[in-house]
Image (cartoon, helix red, strand yellow):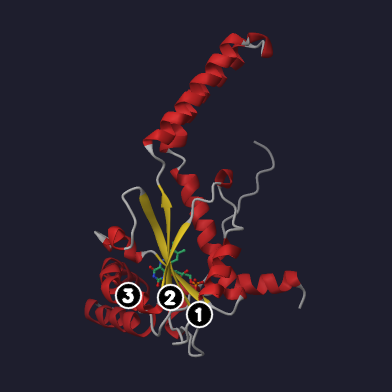
Amino acid sequence: MDSMSSFVEILRQRSSVRAYADDMVPEELIQEIIDLASWAPSAGNTQPWRVKAFSQEATAQFIREFEILGWESALPKIKQLFQDQKKLNSAKANEAVIALLESELRIKGRPSALLIYSKKESFSDFFRYSINAMSLYIYRMINPASENRWDFRVRLTKNLIRRAWKDFFISKSATQASLANFTYALTLAAKSRGLGTCIQFLYNGVFSGFKERIGLTSMDKIFGVVIIGYPTPSTQQDNMGEFRIRNPVNTDWIKRF
Ligand SMILES: Cc1cc2nc3c(=O)[nH]c(=O)nc-3n(C[C@H](O)[C@H](O)[C@H](O)COP(=O)(O)O)c2cc1C
């Protein structure tokens, strides 16, 4: 198979794995996967991602503490989905949700967990951007020859000052996109090395007081968790059908506007 078609295979065959073997993934292999994922594109090449890699033991403890708490918030929505799509009454939908949780959704076996986080920009970063915006503004003021068009100067100056604020307050979305790229790249890199993964964001709402326990501060922002390990042969995910379906992407072609 040529490298392009094997890439397409990886893209199409990656799926969320929730049943893992007991075998330990060597630390060097996990590090290699993290390094491969760092080829993901990031806004301004800022590479905002940081990783806390949990051992199998630490992961087991993590799952014990947070898994059920995390799922609690999602189960009512899944129940509603069952009631709407499968036309189940409330009691039957309860049974179906709990059965799905036990048979498919809960992580089985002994995987590891990679917690992805980023550092928040500090007020001193914002201060530095503002100083830069001001100095560019002053530069434009005292070098009018470098640009004759007054409206351009006014626009640029206004934009520079607005940008300083925007970069501080709004570039969060660019950071989030960069972190998402890294997260997906992790799953593809893992697949290319014969490992399974499952992105897990459900825990995010139940982490109170957790950051300090793993050496993070209030300046660190947890993005999400990727569970990683050797998939078991029984990873069929028979009941996960509706969570695997891909809908056609709604694409509008714009020829002129
Ligand atoms: C941002 C994000 C958060 C997710 N959170 C969870 C989660 O908390 N628990 C879980 O079991 N799967 C989680 N998933 C996996 C999705 O359920 C899964 O990707 C989707 O159903 C498609 O299935 P597939 O990954 O097998 O193709 C998450 C996926 C993404 C991208």
Residue at the image point whose x is 60% and y is 53% from the top = 41
Instruction: Look at discs 3 and 1 and give the one toward the viewer.
Output: 1
The C terminus sits in image quarter: top right
Q: Quadrant of residue 255?
A: top right
Above or below: residue 82 compared with residue 173: below
Give the label on residue 45, or none. none
Residue 151, given in percent of the width and then of the height, sits at: 59, 13
The answer to whether one can see residue 12 in this image is yes
Q: In the image, what residue type sits under mark 3? A: Ile
Dot 3 or dot 1: first in sequence order is 1
Q: Is 13 positioned to the left or the right of 114 in the image?
A: right
Secondary element at tag 2: strand
Instruction: Look at discs 3 and 2 and give the one toward the viewer.
Output: 2
Residue 171, given in percent of the width and then of the height, sits at: 47, 41
Above or below: residue 154 compared with residue 84: above
Q: In the image, what residue type sits under mark 2? A: Ser
Give the label on residue 112, or none. 2
